[in-house]
Each structure stands twice: as structure tokens, then as C-alpha cells.
Image (cartoon, helix red, strand yellow):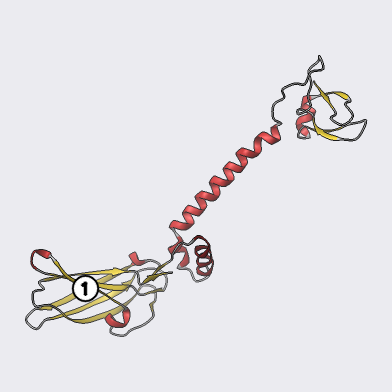
Amino acid sequence: MILTQCPSCRTLFRLDEEGLDSCGGAVRCGQCGAVFQAEVYRINEDGTAATSPVPRARRRWPLALLATVLTLTLAAQILYLTRDRIASFRVMRPVIRALCGQGRCRLQHPAALSDYRLSHPQVDLGTKNGLLHIHAELINAAPFRQSLPLLSVTLLGPSHAILARANYQEQAYLRHPQASLAARKAARVQLLLHIPSNASGYRLALFPTRQE
């Protein structure tokens, strides 16, 4: 049992603590009808105000709020890290684009660059004629259609020093240019470049075309 006092009419009440739990600690005064928290206005037997604990319902909300914030933060981090993969699905791309517009994140094109690879590359490095002739197959191993990457060509000289580097869009390196490549399909790469006479090696790499 606890002793509490109505803050409106100062009427004293003795209440059962178990009954208070069922109503969240709120009680209605039988004299004036005021509703108040019994624990907040609890008093000692000698009539002095008691130092009452914060009601249970009020103790729980900070923990619930913290759990909600942590859950939303984790969800936002997962969404940020996987935004390119999620955006690869046509139905989800407008949603991810809108969210990125609010949060200033960027989407990569193509959505899954790691699923692109150059297969069977054949490169003729003709230093005498100053030509570099590249033949290969560009394969999209992703289970969805995606935009085409940049083909980066790096020319190397003596001691593997970098002489020049250039990035080429699909219009330059595809034998039959197209805007995108279907799932698990290949496109023929054909690129002819004029190079310095002291070029002795090369490197090929794929990069995103842009970010939005």
C-alpha cells in the first residue's frame, strides 16, 4: 500500500501498488475527479512529501526510443552500403534515387561493376607502327541488365612507368555500340589506338561510367 495525495483537492488516498501497475500509475480522485500519477504525489506517513521513483511507464520510453534509433540507424547503414545492388532492380531504383537525393549519396553506374569482366583479351602492341589493337569480350555476369562501364587503357613505358591513361565509353570500344547489356550476355570489344613509340606494355580496367 502507498499513501498519495490529490494535487487538486489535497485528499489523501491509500492505494494498492499492484493495482497501480495495471493502470500505469494513473488514478482519478474520488472527490474532485482529477487524474494524477500516484507515485509522483506520494507522501510519507508523517505527511511529508516522499521522494518517489519515476513511474515505470515513464522509465521505459527512453529505452524504447534508443532501441528505435539504433534500429533505424542500422537499417540506414545497410541501405547505404547496398544501395547500388538494390537500385539495380527497376522497381526500386526510383525509391533509392529519391532517398539518395535527400541524403546526398550517389548511385554507381553500372549498378554491379564487379559482375562485369573482360574475357579472352587479345592485344596487339605494334610499337613500330604506333598502334594498339584490343579485341575482347565484355561479359555481364549479373542476373540483370545494366549500363556499360568505362574501359580504361593505361600505357606503360620502360620500368613500367605510366606513359598515358585514357577512359573510353561504350561508343568507342564496342564493335556494335549499345546503351546497356542484358543479363549474362556478352558484347564484342574492339579498340584501335595510336600510341607512343616507347610504349612497351599496357593495362586494361573497368570503371563506373558516372555517379548520380
In screen coordinates, is 12 left or right of 50?
Answer: right
Residue that extends furthest to the top in the rendered view of this protein: 46
Dot 1 amino acid type: His
Residue at 13% of width from left, 65% of height from top?
Answer: 161
In screen coordinates, is 42 left or right of 207?
Answer: right
In screen coordinates, is 40 left or right of 14?
Answer: left
In the rendered image, residue 151, in percent from the top left (x then y), is placed at 27, 73
| 17 up-or-down from 205: above or below | above
In the rendered image, residue 53, in percent from the top left (x then y), is placed at 69, 26
Q: Relative to the observer, which residue lies in front, 143 or 77? A: 77
How many residues crowd around disc 1 within 10 Å: few (fewer than 14), some, or many (20 or more)?
few
Q: Quadrant of residue 61?
A: top right
Residue that extends furthest to the right in the rendered view of this protein: 31
Residue at 71% of width from left, 31% of height from top?
Answer: 55
Residue identifier under label 1: 120
Residue at 47% of width from left, 63% of height from top?
Answer: 86
Q: In which quarter of the image is residue 16?
A: top right
